[in-house]
Image (cartoon, rainbow, N blue to C red):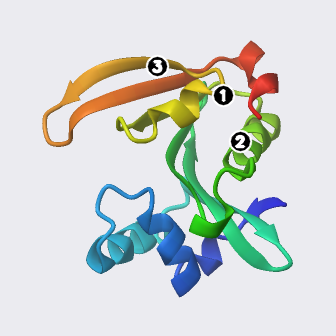
Amino acid sequence: MFQDIKQRIVEPEVGKIISYAAFDGSPEGIANLERKYLSSDKLHFYGWVEDKKVIGICGFEVHCNKVEIHLISVAEDRQKQGIGGAMVAALYKKYGLPLEAETDDDAVEFYRKRNFITTVFQHPMKGKRHTCVLEERQGEHTN
């Protein structure tokens, strides 16, 4: 089930899942992300929860015309089981807005498989990156 887990963001198991997607997956980087989400009303932190256990996370911001995904990741032992796609679908269903994410070469295929249109660009600090956009009509086919 996709639900708000912002108050669970500091749990070690959640931090481990965050580390798979964070640009800075170090303990300090994770702590900075936790503080950033907990101190902001604009940033949302949801998770895929089964039997009270968080197995996937999604950090995002809702704008008037899109939902911007900042983080999306699944527990290592639960990857390749459709959980990431289910979170994308749930996010689209919840807000009904286009979804947008920025990612690297390692994760761009995840978005392409879910019908996101990708555009490559050069980030001044992060290097080669991809902007991934899922328009409204495509949102129904994200699994």
Mark 3 residue type:
Thr
Residue 83 at least partly seen: yes
| Distance from the alpha carbon under mark 2 to that under mark 1 | 7 Å
* 100 relative position to 46: left or right: left
Name the disc covering residue 51, or none.
Answer: none
Query: Which of the pair 33/48 is nearer the observer?
Result: 48
Name the residue tied to disc 2.
Answer: 85
Query: Which of the pair 66/109 is nearer the observer?
Result: 109
| Distance from the alpha carbon under mark 2 to that under mark 3 | 16 Å
Name the residue tied to disc 1.
Answer: 114
The image position of residue 140, as x and y in percent, is 82, 24
**CB under 8 Å between discs 2 and 3:** no
Name the residue tied to disc 3.
Answer: 118
Residue 100 at least partly seen: no
| As drawn, 12 above or below 58 | below
**CB under 8 Å between discs 2 and 1:** yes
Q: Residues within 10 Å of mark 2 (few under 14, many from 20)?
A: some
x 27%, y 77%: residue: 28
- At mark 2, the secondary structure is helix
x 67%, y 60%: residue: 46
| As drawn, 127 above or below 76 | above
